[in-house]
Amino acid sequence: MTTQQQRTQQQSPRRAAIAAFVRFVVCGGGVGLASSGALVLLDGRMPLVVANALITVVSTLLATELHGRISFRSDRGGWGVHLQSALTVAVSYAFTTGALLALHAVQSAPSALTEQTVYLTSSALAGLGRFAVLRAVVYADRRTPAPAAAAPVAKPAPAAKPVLRKVIAGNTAVAIAA
């Protein structure tokens, strides 16, 4: 295998990961922005922690479906995937809620812009962690990898045949190996 072929094989998984991450950001970002708008709409109608919990559950169901089908292009599905994804969301929920509660502890009445900035930033950080776990665990390729192709074995060069030279010494010809 040439060095160029090795580089191409190494870049393919990297490119696939980058493409999956871009799809993850588009799907998750869209759901996240919709969640952010829903949080604004629910503000004042119910406690912030309850609103965040409700939004987290609904957006998780939607995002899990989108990530499975679009982001990771996986044929895995069902409640098992939703439960695994829910574990990552539980951590995300704790993280975003903690960030919002910390903001309210520092500022008793933050502006909507400040609250949204904290919410979206903490959601983005939680999303990075979710991507890593979803890609490596939940939607990981479960197929047994094909054995790596063995490098071709070089055949040993054939032994050099001795070159015979005819040396004439007097009237007698003698063959000697050179």
Image (tube, rainbow, N blue to C red):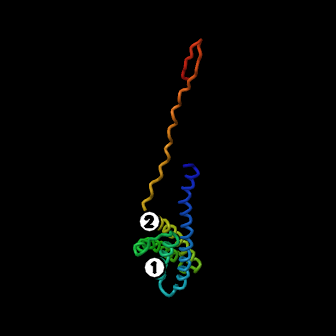
Q: Does residue 140 appear left or right of residue 171 in this picture?
A: left
Residue 165's place in the image compared with 126, above or below, is: above
Q: Is residue 108 or residue 54 the one in the foreground?
A: 54
Quarter where residue 79 is shown: bottom left
Looking at numbered disc 2 in the image, what kind of residue is underneath it? Val
Q: Earlier in the sequence, mark 1 or mark 2?
A: 1
The x and y percentages for residue 21 are 54, 67
The x and y percentages for residue 97 are 48, 75
Q: Label 2's element?
A: helix
Looking at numbered disc 1 in the image, what kind of residue is underneath it? Val
Q: Is residue 128 or residue 174 the one in the foreground?
A: 174
Query: As drawn, which residue projects farthest toward the top?
Result: 170
Measuring 57% from the left and 75% from the top, which residue is drawn there? 117
- Image quadrant in which the C terminus is located: top right
Which residue in the structure is indicated by mark 1?
A: 57
Measuring 50% from the left and 72% from the top, which residue is drawn there? 67
Q: Label 1's element?
A: helix
The x and y percentages for residue 132 are 49, 65
Q: Mark 1 and mark 2 in contact? Answer it, CB < 8 Å.
A: no
Query: As drawn, which residue projects farthest toward the bottom?
Result: 45
**Residue 162, numbered label:** none
Q: Tell me the crowding category of disc 1: few under 14, some 14 to 19, or many 20 or more residues within 10 angstroms, Cα based.
A: some
Q: Nearer the viewer, mark 1 or mark 2?
A: 2
| Count of number-bearing discs | 2
Q: Tell me the crowding category of disc 2: few under 14, some 14 to 19, or many 20 or more residues within 10 angstroms, Cα based.
A: few
**Residue 137, numbered label:** 2
The x and y percentages for residue 15 are 56, 61
Measuring 54% from the left and 22% from the top, which residue is drawn there? 177
Residue 176's place in the image compared with 69, above or below, is: above
User: Residues under labels 1 and 2: Cα distance?
Assistant: 21 Å
